[in-house]
Image: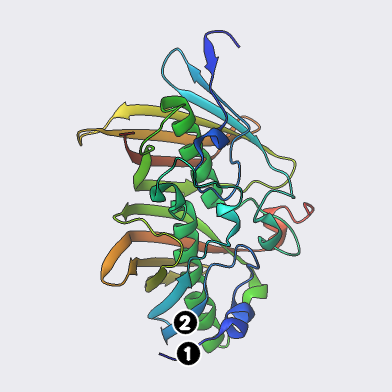
Amino acid sequence: MSPVLDQAEIRALLPQRYPILLVDRVLELVTGERIVAEKAVSACEPCFEGLDGTGIGADRFAFPRPLLIESWGQAGGVLWAATRAAASRPGPEDGLPILAILRDCLFSREVVPGEVVRLEVRIDQVVGPNVFLTGTASVGDELVLTMASALAALRPPAALGEHAT
Amino acid sequence: MSGVAPVPAASDHRVAAPLAAVDDVRLREDGTIQATKRVVATDPYLRGHYPDFTIFPGVFLLEGIIQAFRAAVAPVAEGRLPEMVKLNSARYLSPFVPGDTIVLVLEPHAAEEKDHTRVKARAEKDGAVAARFDLTFRNAV
């Protein structure tokens, strides 16, 4: 399936960059409603650096679950930025998207190098600079995680400690 | 600090991790776990978050909780490590930036499910709560 947003278009919408840009391509996008994106997990990612396989099992090479949450959240970030752009609102420069609240995120499967994670995010509600998201991540027909609710907020960089570099 | 036992570094666990998310971990006599992490701009992944200025990704606080819990309860685990199977809630109040020191305080309790542990945790900055978490771990096997 050809992407509806390629990597160049994703980078126009997301402020995150290598090596923490965790959305590879977007397969479906309905602004204001939902997104389907993909993240391919590779053994080259920094989280696997320095890990020797001797004496450990494949489970030690599971993609870290916090990064799965980040990847899912970034898919939501693309959806939200595309939604704001479609509404002729300013783009990413109107603030950085920050995860504020997560609720009931259930993990049901590990993801290992070579697998492609399908990220599905739906907008529940937009309230000013806040968006409520829900959705899943999966590999093939197996669920990886279910996120009952995530609240993301746009924050101006100055409010986040811009002096720090 | 009296009545605490330092535990081995999280890197001893030989498991995929985005960064060393805790600098030290201590198990206290009352069963709580305390860990600290000084945020530095050269930490792995941080140069992309974001290019113009750096914020410690909120999910890395979760990684710190996972590493602290593993270090405290399964310091020499050979088999399956404790794993976060559910994030019941996370609430972020203020971000961490380079130069900040994160203090993580974990309070483990027996979970309703067999062989699971519920962990309520908070991240503190300068003595104030910066984030709160409620996780469920599947215990080491």
Residue A54 sits above or below residue A161 on the image: above
Image location (x, y in percent) of residue A59:
39, 49
Q: Is residue B56 above or below residue A119?
A: above
Q: Which residue is mark 1?
A: A4
Residue drawn at the location 57% of the way across and 30% of the way down: B9
Question: Which of the chains bears the disc numbered 2?
Answer: A
Tell me which residue sits at (45%, 27%) in the image: B76
User: How far apart are labels 2 and 1 at the CA level?
Assistant: 6 Å
Q: Earlier in the sequence, mark 2 or mark 1?
A: 1
Q: Tell me which chain the residue with mark 1 is part of.
A: A
The outermost residue toward the front is A54
Three-letter amino acid code at disc 2?
Answer: Val
Tell me where residue A34 sits by quadrant.
Answer: bottom left
Is there a contact, CB below 8 Å, between mark 2 and mark 1?
A: yes
The amino acid type, in three-letter code, at marker 1 is Val
Q: Secondary structure at mark 1?
A: loop
At x 46%, y 52%, the residue is A61
Please say if A29 is above or below B127.
below
Circle 2: element type: strand
Crowding at label 2, few (<14), some or many (≥20) Cα neighbours within 10 Å?
many
The mark found on residue A26 in the picture is 2
Residue at the limit of the structure toward the top, as seen here: B2
Where residue B36 sits: x, y (%)? 61, 31
Which quadrant: the N terminus of chain B? top right
